[in-house]
Amino acid sequence: MNAEFFTQLKNIGTTDFNLSISLSYLKNENLMTVSLLPIAKDNADPVLKKLKPLTLTATPEELDQKFFEVITEPIKDTVSFISSTSEYIKQQNQLKANTQVEKDKAEKVKKKEKELKELMGEESELQNNAKKIKSLIVDIMTIDPNNSYAKKCNEIVLSATAQESLF
């Protein structure tokens, strides 16, 4: 009896898997069927739930001799596939979250630009609204430092307030 079965099983490279062993007696042969399937626990990809187990049917003696030799590479490939799929899904979820953050930022800038346009209105109103305009410009530039409309409005306000201080 080979006492290293569980040690070799541990060294395959996966921590979670299903193992099924069944005996069958076909045509007076003493055959065993062994199925081994790595489990993708933390993976939300439904495709991985459709993975079929690696199944071997042979005599107990043949399985004793070649079981680990036959299963090691396919199981390592499957584990690698599961791992890379998990990483891909994590990255995809991060990108979705980042995209939503960018959409939210763009929406905030749009709202503040609209408010700024209303306040910029006529030059006569510029002096009365200068504080609120400056505040909106700062808000927009905080969210989007390269916002051209906010920069343009800032120049106009600076020019208008500089003329006011001359008189």
Image (tube, helix red, strand yellow):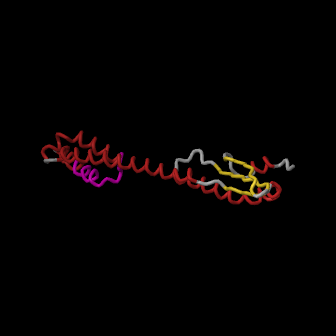
User: Is residue 79 among what the camera can see?
Assistant: no
Tell me residue 69's x, y (percent).
77, 59
Question: Is the C terminus in the top left, top right, bottom left or bottom right quadrant?
Answer: top left
Please give the name of the residue rendered at 38% of the width and 49% of the height, measured from the top-left corner. Answer: 102
52 relative position to 23: left or right: left
Left or right: 17 with respect to 131?
right
On screen, residue 84 above or below 137: below
Among the 4 quarters of the image, the one containing residue 55: bottom right
The location of residue 9, given as percent across then percent down, is 75, 49
Q: Residue at x 62, y 48 (%)?
A: 39
Q: Is residue 60 visible?
A: yes
In this orientation, which residue lies closer to the viewer: 77 or 1?
1
132 relative to 2, above or below: above
Total number of numbered discs in the rendering: 0
- Residue at the spot x=28%, y=52% of the render? 151
Q: Is residue 119 magenta?
A: no
Majority secondary structure of the magenta segment? helix
Q: Which residues are magenta?
A: 142-157
Relative placement, left or right, of 96 versus 70 is: left
Indicate left or right for 140 with 6 as reference.
left
The furthest residue to the front? 27
Q: Nearer the viewer, residue 85 or 150?
A: 85
Residue 103: image location, x then y, percent: 35, 49
Q: Residue at x 71, y 57 (%)?
A: 56
> What percent of the width, then of the height, locates residue 129?
19, 40
Q: Nearer the viewer, residue 121 or 166?
A: 121
Magenta residue check for 147: yes
